[in-house]
Image (cartoon, helix red, strand yellow):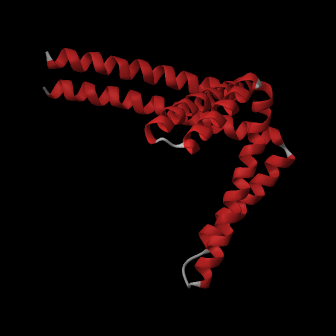
C-alpha cells in the first residue's frame, strides 16, 4: 500500500518537474510574453490580496485594512487591465528597487565602517546595485531580460528540485 502511494506521489513530482523545466526554458526564450504573464499575475495577486485585507478588516474591525484592501484591488485591476503598460513599467520599478536597495547598502556599509566592521562587501553590492539600476533606466530592455532570466531560472530550478524529489522517492521505494 505504501509503495503505491509513494509511486503516485513520485509521478506527480516528476510531471511537475518536467513541466516546470520546460516552462523555465520557455520564459527564457519568450521574454516579452513572459513579462506580460508576470504583469497579469501581479494584477491578480493584488486583487486576491486586497480581498484578504477586506475580509481581515471585518475580523479586526480595522478601517486601515479596509482601505488597503480597496487600494490593492484598485491597483490590481489597473495592472490587469493594462498589461502592456504594466509590463513596460516593470523594468523601471525593478530599477528603482535596485537603486533603493543599493543606496541602503552603501549607507549600511558606511555605518559598518564607522563602527569598525567589515564594510567592503556591503559597499560593493550597493555600488553594483546603483550602477545596475542606472543601466536599466538607460536601457529598459536590460531590465526586461534580467527579470525574465531570473524568473525563468527560478522556474527551471523548481522543476529540477521536483525531479530530484521524484528520484529520492524512487530510492526510498527500493529500500522498502
In-image side of 103 versus 69 (left or right): right
| Quarter of the rendering containing residue 171 | top left
106 up-or-down from 18: above or below: below
Q: Quadrant of the C terminus?
A: top left
| Quarter of the rendering containing residue 9 | top left
Residue drawn at (77%, 25%), measured in percent from left and top?
A: 82
176 up-or-down from 99: above or below: above
In-image side of 14 versus 122 (left or right): left
Depth order, front residue of 50/31:
50
Residue drawn at (68%, 69%), measured in percent from left and top?
A: 106
| Quarter of the rendering containing residue 59 | top left
Q: Quadrant of the N terminus?
A: top left
- Count all numbered tags in the image, as a single digit: 0
In-image side of 76 versus 173 (left or right): right
116 up-or-down from 56: above or below: below
Residue drawn at (71%, 58%), measured in percent from left and top?
A: 100
The spot of residue 65 in percent (x, y) is 55, 41
Q: Is residue 31 visible?
A: no
The spot of residue 108 in percent (x, y) is 62, 71
The spot of residue 75 in percent (x, y) is 69, 33
Residue drawn at (15%, 28%), measured in percent from left and top?
A: 175
154 up-or-down from 103: above or below: above
The spot of residue 115 in percent (x, y) is 56, 84
Q: Is residue 3 visible?
A: yes
Amino acid at each position: 500500500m505504501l509503495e503505491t502511494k509513494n509511486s503516485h506521489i513520485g509521478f506527480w513530482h516528476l510531471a511537475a518537474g518536467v513541466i516546470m523545466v520546460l516552462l523555465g526554458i520557455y520564459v527564457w526564450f519568450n521574454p516579452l510574453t513572459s513579462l506580460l504573464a508576470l504583469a497579469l499575475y501581479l494584477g491578480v495577486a493584488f486583487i486576491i490580496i486586497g480581498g484578504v485585507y477586506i475580509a481581515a478588516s471585518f475580523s479586526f474591525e480595522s478601517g486601515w485594512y479596509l482601505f488597503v484592501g480597496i487600494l490593492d484591488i484598485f491597483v490590481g485591476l489597473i495592472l490587469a487591465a493594462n498589461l502592456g503598460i504594466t509590463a513596460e513599467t516593470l523594468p523601471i520599478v525593478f530599477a528603482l528597487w535596485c537603486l533603493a536597495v543599493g543606496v541602503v547598502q552603501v549607507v549600511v556599509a558606511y555605518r559598518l565602517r564607522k563602527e569598525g566592521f567589515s564594510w567592503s562587501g556591503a559597499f560593493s553590492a550597493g555600488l553594483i546595485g546603483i550602477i545596475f539600476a542606472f543601466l536599466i533606466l538607460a536601457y529598459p530592455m536590460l531590465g526586461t531580460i534580467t527579470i525574465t532570466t531570473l524568473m525563468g531560472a527560478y522556474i527551471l530550478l523548481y522543476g529540477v528540485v521536483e525531479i530530484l524529489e521524484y528520484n529520492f522517492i524512487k530510492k526510498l521505494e527500493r529500500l522498502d
